[in-house]
Amino acid sequence: MKYVIMIHSNPEPWGHPTADYLAAHQELPAEVRDRLHADFEQVMTELHANGELIGGEALGAPSAARLYRWRDGTPLVSDGPYSETKEHLAGFFLIDVEDPARAHAVAAKFAGPGETVELRPLMWPGGGDQ
Amino acid sequence: MWRREAPHVRAALLRRWGHLDACDDAVQEAAEAAVTRWPVTGVPDDPRAWLVRVASRRLIDQLRADSARARRESLDAARRPDAAVDQTPTNRADDTLRLLFLCCHPALSRPSQVALTLRAVAGLRVEQIAAAHLVPARTMTQRLHRARTALRRAGARFTLPSPPELPARVAAVLDVCHLVFTEGYTRTSGTTLLDVELAEEAIRLTRQVHAALPDHHEATGALALMLLTHARSPARTDAAGDLVPLAEQDRTRWRHDLIDEGVTLLGQALPHGPVGRYQLQAAIAAVHAEAPTFPATDWRQISILYDMLSRVAPSPFVTLNQAVAVAMAHGPSLGLALLDPLLTDPAMLRHHRLHAVRAHLLERTGDPDAAAHYRRAAALTASLPEQRYLNRRLTGR
């Protein structure tokens, strides 16, 4: 089953990997940062080796976004950011795993201080007839 | 030609060399050589011998070149570079079975077993397997690579399991075949055009298992189940490609040839007992297949069969289906009562089917809570057709 793992974050300045630009992350003792980094590398290697990782991308800054809203029958264009919330979508990973338990375990490994990780199932076109 | 010969060529190499990963690559290269050579030179008199010879040569080259691979094979190959690969014709069914046992080895995860079986036994291309699973080819390549490495590490061999292991290993093979079938069956939405029909591949694989183990009644049961379920496929989608639930299917479009074959197989298996889960599921499918209409279904019979199934292979999903059957046979409140134990299971509470069944039964009792359960079920399902169906029940549109 497929899931998207979305990283909601607010690196300052905007940059990737987001952890490098997050105060909450930088304030951690070096050994904790190293452990988090190693854990992340390990889960990425594992996802790749297992053929569970379909893809993923880092996104540009929210202020670089162009927004298209519908006004009076035409698109009205403005500049980002899309929302004034604290965190923005910073990147995503697409995974295909055996079951929800595996997805939960993987998503937990993406968590870090100062960020929210969102795990959402993907819809698929099939289904049973009962 | 290639699809027919590939398993034999692979089996001949496996008997001689043992390692699936190396053999698979060599067989693939032999196939590619055949594609370029045969149109020029003509198809050889004995294509299988030609393929085995070419594949063996490639395999030996590869083993020599690859110093990282187990030294034993390299030495072996260097010492006897022209050693004849065993080409004696053996029981074809037996070879297929050995290959299935290897692909469904307990060292592999279920998805890896499925991928490897489709590659090595069914002979599908990586691109076809990837397309059938809606993942990119490189993801599938990675999965196959991982699976072959795991087999090598586990020391898996192209042999028949020992008698004490055999029942569990056959069960794993049947489960993999059935998983391929359900993947194919639930994935066909009518709009997705695939190169390959996984449900039909699964039936072909299970026919081979049945041919190799004609007295294994669960293998017979698994084949019967797939045939009886696949018989519904012409009626499962409407003109727009949307799923049609069993209750609304045009039964005149069901494949009666498959139903007859499934019922005959089941008739051969059932009298022998003890009856396993595939035979019971096949028996349930047979009751559906023999009912002229949905309301005329023998729901008492189905609820008895589900009761047996819940003893042989208990699972929350069997309980769900049992609740539906009991509700049809004896009224919705008895069905709802069966669902109660599932309501304390956190994993089931996150599963759409519990809420969908509950919504259905509550709707039948006239309980207004039905809507909340339809809403929850629609939010939880990842299946687009099921979500559309549940939203229709919710909104009355």
Image: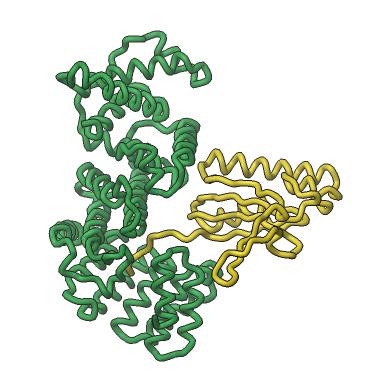
Chain colours: A yellow, B green
Quadrant for the N terminus of chain B, please.
Answer: top left
Residue B141 vs residue B80: left or right? right
Q: In percent of the image, x 64 and y 61: which residue is there? A: A77
Q: In percent of the image, x 22 and y 37: which residue is there? A: B93
Number of labels in the image equals 0
- List x then y, in percent, for residue B278: 29, 59
- List x then y, in percent, for residue B256: 14, 62
- List x then y, in percent, for residue B269: 19, 57
Q: Is residue B174 above or below residue B80?
A: below
The answer to which of B201 and B344 lies nearer the viewer is: B201
Q: Quadrant of residue B283?
A: bottom left
> Residue B168: in sight, yes or no?
no
Q: Quadrant of residue B117?
A: top left
> Residue B83: in sight, yes or no?
yes
Q: In percent of the image, x 32 and y 53: which residue is there? A: B181
The answer to which of B12 and A128 lies nearer the viewer is: A128
Quadrant for the C terminus of chain B, please.
Answer: bottom left
Residue B148 vs residue B120: left or right? right
- List x then y, in percent, for residue B329: 28, 82
